[in-house]
């Protein structure tokens, strides 16, 4: 049997970071849609702001756009 110590503080920090990233992503997508930017421009901005590859940014866009 393997027991590991649960670090509640670290878990909370990770969850907050993921929440902030998700909020930023939604804000970027909504703003770009309001400005009528292309999917390519939107994914480029997601890539730049969230420090992810263009491929990952495209997937994120497709999963979170309306």
Image (cartoon, rainbow, N blue to C red):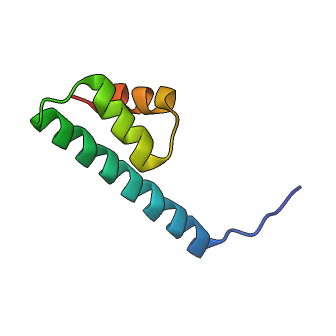
Please tell me which residue is depicted at 36% across the width and 28% down the height of the picture. Answer: 63
Q: Give percent across and percent down for residue 13.
A: 52, 68
Q: Give percent across and percent down for residue 60.
A: 40, 33
Apparent side of residue 29 relative to residue 22 in the rendered image (left or right) = left
Please tell me which residue is depicted at 43% across the width and 33% down the height of the picture. Answer: 57
Please tell me which residue is depicted at 43% across the width and 39% down the height of the picture. Answer: 47
Residue 52 against residue 13 in the figure, above or below? above
Image quarter of the N terminus: bottom right
Q: Give percent across and percent down for residue 48.
A: 42, 44
Image quarter of the C terminus: top left
Query: How many marks overall?
Result: 0
Apparent side of residue 31 relative to residue 28 in the rendered image (left or right) = left
Residue 22 against residue 46 in the figure, above or below? below
Identity of the residue furthest to the right in this view: 1
Q: Give percent across and percent down for residue 26.
A: 27, 44
Residue 42 against residue 39 in the figure, above or below? below
Apparent side of residue 43 relative to residue 31 in the rendered image (left or right) = right
Please tell me which residue is depicted at 57% across the width and 65% down the height of the picture. Answer: 11
Residue 11 against residue 43 in the figure, above or below? below
Where on the picture, by quarter, is residue 18? Answer: bottom left
Identity of the residue furthest to the bottom in this view: 9
Asked whether 17 or 10 is in front, the reply is 17
Asked whether 59 or 10 is in front, the reply is 59
């Amino acid at each position: 049997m393997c027991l590991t110590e649960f670090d509640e503080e670290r878990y909370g920090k990770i969850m907050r970071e993921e929440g902030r990233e998700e909020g930023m992503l939604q804000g970027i997508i909504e703003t770009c849609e309001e400005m009528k930017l292309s999917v390519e421009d939107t994914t480029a901005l997601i890539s730049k702001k969230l420090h992810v590859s263009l491929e990952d940014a495209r997937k994120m866009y497709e999963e979170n756009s309306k």
